Image (tube, rainbow, N blue to C red):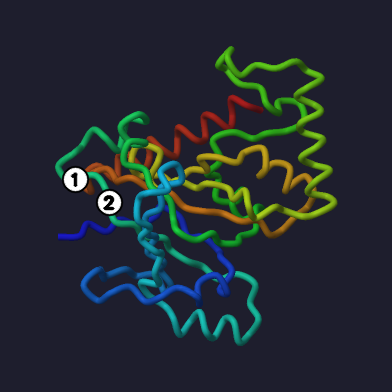
Amino acid sequence: MTHICFSSEIYHLDPKDLIILADTSTKSKEDCADDVVVLIGEKDLYDKTKPIINDTLLKGRNIVKKAIAKNQPFIPVRIAFVSRINRWDFISPLIRVLRYKYKAYSSNIYHIDPFEIRKLKIERSFRTPENAYQFSNPKYQMPEEERVKLYNQLKDSMQTNGYDDRFPLDIMLCRNLGIQDTLNQGHHRMGVAIDCNIHRVSVMFSAAGQAPKFLHPLFRLVAKFNLWFKHIWQK
């Protein structure tokens, strides 16, 4: 049986990105209280030989149509995904190396306001001119002058050309302890977009699996605390 999991957060996405999606097959549908739900497919960014499973609209086509007719820039959307990890596997959703073994990406990109992402408090770090391109791994350390240069180049590019859709942010669903969504890649782009007061960026969603349901209440609290502690530590 298909095991469908849901994002921990609601994302406000451009309805024009949703209307182009085909409807999810009836066999894959599961009950969900949210009005609009996108079921992401599977795309391997690193192995082009693997077949792509397209994203589909699980629920809410009429709402999407009405939003477009009213020219609404964004509407609330829940993101769903088919777990690539077996239900009985309690370990893989919790361990980074194992989680990434099963990770796949949405086939499409979507547009969102980066200020909305910040409100969700799902960033694992905040990148600023002061800490840009500073990494704990000595392998990736670079001189101060080079760090500043890279940050300014990115900022100048966004101020001149806007956000480049070829480089979407990556939000991984249920990344933190297999329950909490987090911004996985793109913290510098996110920070610069906000610095430049840009209100439209591209995003893709990725996922692997989810922690067992009976652990959700406890893990949700721990995951929220982990993100809160990271944010406090960086200030």
The residue furthest front is 49
Pick the residue in front: 216 or 204: 204
User: Residue at horizontal 73%, vertical 48%?
Assistant: 194
The mark found on residue 83 in the picture is 2
Q: Quarter of the image for the N terminus: give it.
A: bottom left
Q: Looking at this view, is 206 or 190 the one in front?
A: 206
Give the residue displayed 24% in from the left and 42% down from the top.
215
Residue type at mark 1 is Asn
Q: Position of residue 66 (x, y in %)?
A: 54, 86
> Does dot 1 land on a helix, a strand or a loop?
loop
> In x, y percent, where is residue 119?
60, 51
For residue 176, above or below residue 27: above
* Contact? badges 1 and 2 (CB < 8 Å): yes
Between the C-alphas of marks 1 and 2, the distance is 7 Å
**What's the amino acid at mark 2?**
Ser
The residue that disc 1 covers is 86
Q: Is residue 67 above or below residue 194?
A: below
Residue 158 to residue 76: above or below = above
- How many labels, in total? 2
Q: For residue 88, which quarter of the picture?
A: top left
Q: Give the camera-side residue of 26 and 131.
A: 26
Instruction: Kindly state the secondary structure of the residue where label 2 is placed.
Output: loop
- Residue furthest to the top in view is 138
